Image (cartoon, helix red, strand yellow):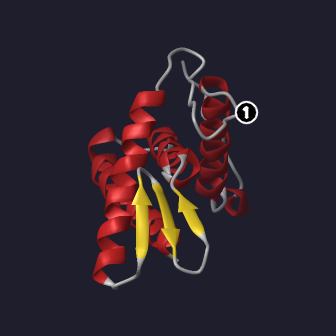
Amino acid sequence: MKKEIKFSKQAESYKDIISFIIALILSQLIWKVMFYDDFDNCRWDSKYLNITHIIDNYCFFIANIAEKYLKYFNIEYVQNGNMFYFDNNTSLGIVWGCTGIKQTIVFIISILLSRGSIIYKIPYIISGSILVFCINIFRILM
């Protein structure tokens, strides 16, 4: 027989907030267990497999989207792969940290660890991932 834990009325109002914080902490721990922290800009290793080529392709994908926005706003630049060079002697390199992959993975894990049916979480995962992607592109261009 399962014993249910009773909370006071005041503590009951914080239960969802506490469960979200626990889910967020667990998602960060899952990230730490799965990936190395000493990333450089060229190699992206999971502790279990090398996913550098996937991340490189995603960096070029992000760079191509950034290129379209730079063309749209008539900004002068020279592109070399995922590097952009501008007239005022500045440059922009799109590397793994610019992709927003970690933020998206932590977001998805946080949603999956929260209470509720997976069916109701799917629209939040999809819309939230798209929103994280769009905010990340905006952040790169600013």
Residue 23, how many percent across, how many down?
60, 43
Residue 112, how many percent across, how many down?
44, 40
Q: Is residue 127 left or right of residue 53?
A: left
Judge by depth and name the residue closer to the eye, 50 or 88. Answer: 88
For the N terminus, the image quarter is: top right
Residue occupying image coordinates x 48% and y 46%: 101
**Depicted 49 relative to depicted 124: above or below:** above
Residue 19, how many percent across, how many down?
61, 47
Q: Amino acid at mark 1?
A: Asp
The residue at the far top in this view is 48
Q: Is residue 106 left or right of residue 13?
A: left
Judge by depth and name the residue closer to the eye, 83 or 118. Answer: 83
Judge by depth and name the residue closer to the eye, 31 or 79. Answer: 79
Residue occupying image coordinates x 59% and y 38%: 27
Residue 66, how many percent across, how many down?
38, 66
**Depicted 130 relative to depicted 33: above or below:** below
| Location of residue 102 by image quarter | top right
Residue occupying image coordinates x 32% and y 62%: 65
Name the residue carrying label 1. 38
| Location of residue 46 by image quarter | top right
The local secondary structure at tag 1 comes to loop
